C-alpha cells in the first residue's frame, strides 16, 4: 500500500501551477469580452423590438384611420391637427393630436386621440383612443404633424410612431418611426367639403 502511494507521488502527469494560472487568465479575458458585448446586444435587441412594435402600431393606426374617415361625412379640418367629422352611424367625432404636460413648463404630443361624442349621452363625451393602450406599449404613440381636407381627400402628413423618453436603461430614447409618406384617405360620402 505504501509502495502504491510513493508511485503516485512520483508520477509527474498533471498541470503545473503556471499552466493553471495561464488557463484562468485566458478564461477571465474571454468572460470580460463576453460581458462587455452583452449591453450592446441588448441595445440592438431593444432597437429592433421598438421598430417592430412601431410598425405594428402604425399599421393599426392607418387601418383605423381609413376605417373611420373613409365612411365619414361632414369632414372639416380645424387648424392643422384637428379633424372633425360625422361617423357612418351619425355620431360626431373628433380626431386630434393629444398633448400632455411632461414637465411644468413643457408640453409634448402624446399621440392621436380619437374622441367620439355620442348623442345618447348629451351631458358628457365618450372618448376612446385610436389604438388601445395595450397596442401603444413600451411608450410608443402615434402622432402626426398636419391634416388637410380638399376635394373629398383627407391628407395626414408626418404620421409616425414615437418612443417617448423613459428611465429604462438601454432603451432608444426619443426614437421616431415615420410612416414614410402622407396618408391620403378618400372620403366616400364627400358631401361636406371644407
Image (cartoon, rainbow, N blue to C red):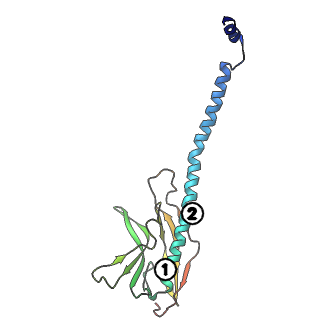
Residue 71, placed above or below residue 144: below
Q: Which residue is mark 1?
A: 147
Q: Secondary structure at mark 1?
A: strand
Tell me if label 2 and label 1 are in contact, CB under 8 Å.
Answer: no
Residue extending farthest front: 1
Q: Is residue 157 visible?
A: no
Q: Residues within 10 Å of mark 1 (few under 14, many from 20)?
A: many
Closer to the N terminus: mark 2 or mark 1?
A: 2
Identify the residue at horizontal 58%, vertical 75% (top origin). Answer: 181
Q: Which mark is residue 107?
A: none
Q: x%, y% of residue 58?
A: 53, 70
Q: Using the rendered view, name the quadrant where residue 120 is placed.
A: bottom left
Drawn side of residue 42 relative to residue 78, left or right: right
Apparent side of residue 100 relative to residue 141 in the rendered image (left or right): left
Estimate the spatial distance between the alpha carbons at disc 2 and disc 1, rounded to whole Å.
26 Å
> On residue 52, which mark appears?
2
The location of residue 106, given as percent across then percent down, is 38, 63
Amino acid at each position: 500500500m505504501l509502495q502504491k502511494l510513493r508511485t503516485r507521488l512520483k508520477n509527474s502527469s498533471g498541470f503545473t501551477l503556471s499552466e493553471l494560472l495561464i488557463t484562468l487568465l485566458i478564461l477571465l479575458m474571454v468572460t470580460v469580452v463576453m460581458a462587455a458585448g452583452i449591453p450592446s446586444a441588448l441595445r440592438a435587441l431593444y432597437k429592433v423590438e421598438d421598430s417592430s412594435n412601431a410598425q405594428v402600431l402604425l399599421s393599426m393606426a392607418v387601418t383605423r384611420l381609413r376605417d373611420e374617415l373613409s365612411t365619414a361625412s361632414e369632414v372639416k379640418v380645424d387648424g392643422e391637427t384637428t379633424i372633425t367629422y360625422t361617423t357612418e352611424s351619425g355620431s360626431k367625432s373628433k380626431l386630434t393630436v393629444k398633448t400632455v404636460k411632461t414637465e411644468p413648463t413643457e408640453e409634448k404630443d402624446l399621440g392621436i386621440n380619437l374622441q367620439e361624442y355620442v348623442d345618447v349621452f348629451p351631458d358628457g363625451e365618450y372618448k376612446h383612443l385610436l389604438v388601445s393602450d395595450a397596442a401603444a406599449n413600451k411608450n410608443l404613440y402615434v402622432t402626426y404633424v398636419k391634416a388637410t381636407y380638399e376635394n373629398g381627400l383627407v391628407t395626414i402628413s408626418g404620421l409616425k410612431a414615437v418612443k417617448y423618453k423613459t428611465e429604462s436603461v438601454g432603451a432608444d430614447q426619443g426614437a421616431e418611426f415615420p410612416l414614410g409618406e402622407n396618408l391620403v384617405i378618400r372620403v366616400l360620402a364627400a358631401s361636406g367639403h371644407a
